[in-house]
Amino acid sequence: NAGVTQTPKFQVLKTGQSMTLQCAQDMNHNSMYWYRQDPGMGLRLIYYSASEGTTDKGEVPNGYNVSRLNKREFSLRLESAAPSQTSVYFCASSILSGGEGASYNEQFFGPGTRLTVL
Amino acid sequence: AQSVTQPDIHITVSEGASLELRCNYSYGATPYLFWYVQSPGQGLQLLLKYFSGDTLVQGIKGFEAEFKRSQSSFNLRKPSVHWSDAAEYFCAVATTSGTYKYIFGTGTRLKVLA
């Protein structure tokens, strides 16, 4: 059981190049997320997919696109990379959990992709 | 709008000393609250969570947190810090409206002196 995996671990791009970050989970979770982490700003949600076949914008979606390929996989694409997209990117997946009358959304995180755009 | 505030960007404690990391949230309904820890170069690991019931929750690695509704706080505590606790700690609130989103604080970086 690998949990949430991300590829690549590191990437350097030139301004204007494109790339796709891959994420996969083997926990049979319905929901998946992409975050970016920048110093002093915590984690900010880029896009999420509440269930297979649906995607929605988060807090900072500009410059990104996503694809929920199947229940396991959720990819993030940068069509034309910019230096402002230099960041660490985390993928997460979640189940709904909770007791009677309650449900909450516990998220499990991948190890991250460190992206530098020159 | 929902928000999470971690007022301390950096905290330094001596090994063996007690620790308290502060977290305040703004959310209209009963919040679901989480603390995560991130070691250098690693992803986030869940320390503990609160969604109902006892307001004092126990987590992994000897951490605990107390939910105080009147103060809109969910502070993380540990009675005796170990050098391996040096990391960055994030508080998060989960929305309960069905949109499945977390809102993270900006993090507190903990340094432990030997």
Image (cartoon, grey):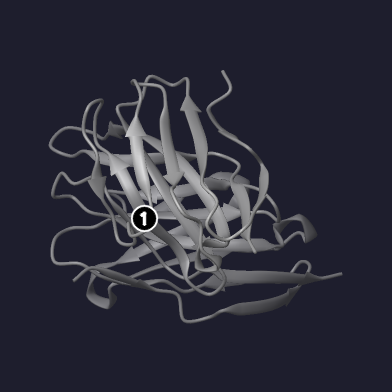
* Residue A6: x %, y % from top left: 57, 35
Q: Residue furthest right?
A: B114
* Residue A85: x %, y % from top left: 51, 62
Q: Residue at x 70, y 52 (%)?
A: B41
> Does the rendering let one see residue B18?
no
Up/down of A86 relative to B62, above or below: below
* Residue B93: x %, y % from top left: 32, 58
* Residue A90: x %, y % from top left: 51, 47
Residue type marked 1? Leu
Q: Which residue is mark 1?
A: A45
Q: Quick one: B70 or A49, which is closer to the camera? A: A49
Q: Quick one: A87 or A80, which is closer to the camera? A: A80
Up/down of B47 relative to A38, above or below: above
Q: Residue at x 26, y 35 (%)?
A: A98
- Lateral position of residue B18 relative to residue A53, left or right: right
Q: Residue at x 18, y 50 (%)?
A: B96
Q: Residue at x 42, y 26 (%)?
A: A73
Q: Quick one: B2 or A41, which is closer to the camera? A: A41
